[in-house]
Image (cartoon, grey):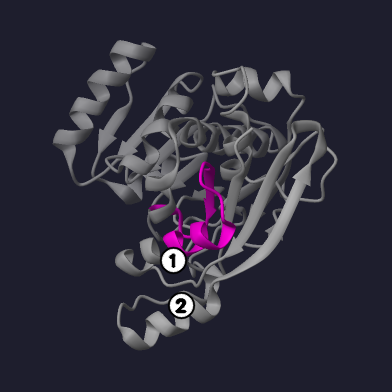
């Protein structure tokens, strides 16, 4: 297997600067944390911590710096920092696994509340953004009642046609955030929004501590794996491993390797589901 560069950051102390002073700070805060070896896979995972500077230019400089520190020439990246920048470094398998992770954690929360994805209203906002496209695909395979919310109704109309053609369901498309959220059993959002307290919410943007929190907030999950290791396996890291195996279908790869959802998280806290 190709080695993996597992990149993390203290995202709660983020800043957005691109000048000489912060370049020095970035260099100081970026460091190599060591290698982990998974014997069953003959796999080296190099852990690098980068500064939480999410200025786009500075971010990519820090990623290049982390690659240099790892000393690998051929590798797979597993960035777990600011999701909206990490997204562009993920391969298609990692993106699909993240989407599946959102859907499976959503199904778990709904089940614990006595509901199913098929009899629930799933609201996705902002549905025009590329970060949620794979999630919309994943949700559309099972859900029957989907509301796509965005100011860009032209994009939503095209997306609606795509979903009808591929999944045989017709989502509702709308600009009306307030009404949509009032009907929701579960919300997936890329933005900070005012939430009705009883509705579970999956926040795709993991860079903020949200003020208008509901009773159940999610922005990450951890998987339980069959290999001997103390690492926490988020979707990005797990995807970097599974994409190198024989199974190219994400769901098949998860099942074949005996991998299960372990923890549903909000920042560093395990989410407790209130029935």
For the residue pair 134 and 112, the one nearer the viewer reads as 134
The answer to if 55 sits in the magenta stretch is: no
Q: Are marks 2 and 1 in contact (CB under 8 Å)?
A: yes
User: Is residue 162 shown above or below 74?
Assistant: above
For the residue pair 64 and 263, the one nearer the viewer reads as 64
Q: Is residue 122 left or right of residue 47?
A: left
Residue at 70% from the left image edge and 61% from the top image edge: 34
For the residue pair 33 and 253, the one nearer the viewer reads as 33
User: Is residue 190 shown above or below 59?
Assistant: above
Q: Is residue 121 left or right of residue 8?
A: left
Q: Which residues are magenta?
A: 63-84
Residue 27 at x, y percent in the picture: 48, 77
The answer to if 79 sits in the magenta stretch is: yes
- Mark seen at residue 37: none
Residue 220 at x, y percent in the picture: 60, 50
Q: Which residue is mark 2?
A: 26
Residue at 55% from the left image edge and 31% from the top image edge: 100
Residue at 38% from the left image edge and 65% from the top image edge: 61
Which residue ends up furthest to the left in the rendered image? 154
Q: Which residue is mark 1?
A: 62
Q: CA distance from mark 2 to mark 1?
A: 7 Å
Quarter that holds the N terminus: top right
Which residue ends up furthest to the right in the rendered image? 228
- Answer few, some or many: residues within 10 Å of disc 2's Cα (few below 14, many 20 plus, some between 14 and 19): many
Tell me the SS state at disc 1: helix
Tell me the SS state at disc 2: helix
For the residue pair 267 and 112, the one nearer the viewer reads as 267
Residue at 54% from the left image edge and 72% from the top image edge: 30
Q: Earlier in the sequence, mark 2 or mark 1?
A: 2
Q: Is residue 9 left or right of residue 141?
A: right
Residue 5 at x, y percent in the picture: 58, 50
């Amino acid at each position: 297997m190709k080695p993996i560069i597992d990149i993390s950051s203290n995202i709660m102390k983020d800043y957005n600067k691109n000048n000489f002073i912060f370049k020095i700070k970035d260099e100081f805060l970026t460091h190599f944390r060591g290698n982990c070896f998974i014997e069953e896979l003959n796999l080296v995972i190099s852990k690098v911590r980068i500064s939480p500077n999410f200025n786009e230019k500075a971010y990519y400089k820090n990623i290049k710096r982390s690659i240099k520190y790892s000393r690998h020439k051929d590798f797979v990246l597993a960035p777990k920092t600011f999701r909206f920048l990490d997204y562009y470094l993920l391969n298609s398998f990692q993106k699909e696994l993240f989407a599946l992770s959102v859907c499976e954690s959503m199904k778990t929360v709904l089940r614990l509340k006595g509901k199913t994805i098929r009899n629930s209203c799933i609201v996705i906002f902002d549905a025009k953004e590329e970060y949620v496209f794979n999630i919309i695909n994943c949700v559309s395979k099972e859900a029957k009642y989907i509301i796509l919310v965005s100011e860009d109704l032209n994009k939503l109309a095209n997306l609606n046609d795509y979903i009808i053609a591929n999944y045989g369901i017709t989502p509702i498309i709308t600009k009306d955030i307030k009404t949509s959220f009032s009907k929701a059993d579960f919300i997936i959002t890329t933005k900070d929004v005012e939430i009705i307290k009883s509705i579970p919410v999956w926040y795709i943007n993991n860079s903020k501590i949200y003020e208008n929190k509901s009773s159940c907030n999610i922005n990450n999950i951890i998987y339980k794996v069959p290999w001997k290791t103390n690492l926490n396996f988020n979707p990005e890291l797990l995807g970097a491993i599974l994409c190198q195996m024989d199974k190219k279908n994400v769901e098949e790869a998860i099942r074949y390797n005996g991998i299960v959802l372990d923890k549903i998280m909000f920042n560093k806290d395990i989410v407790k589901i209130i029935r």
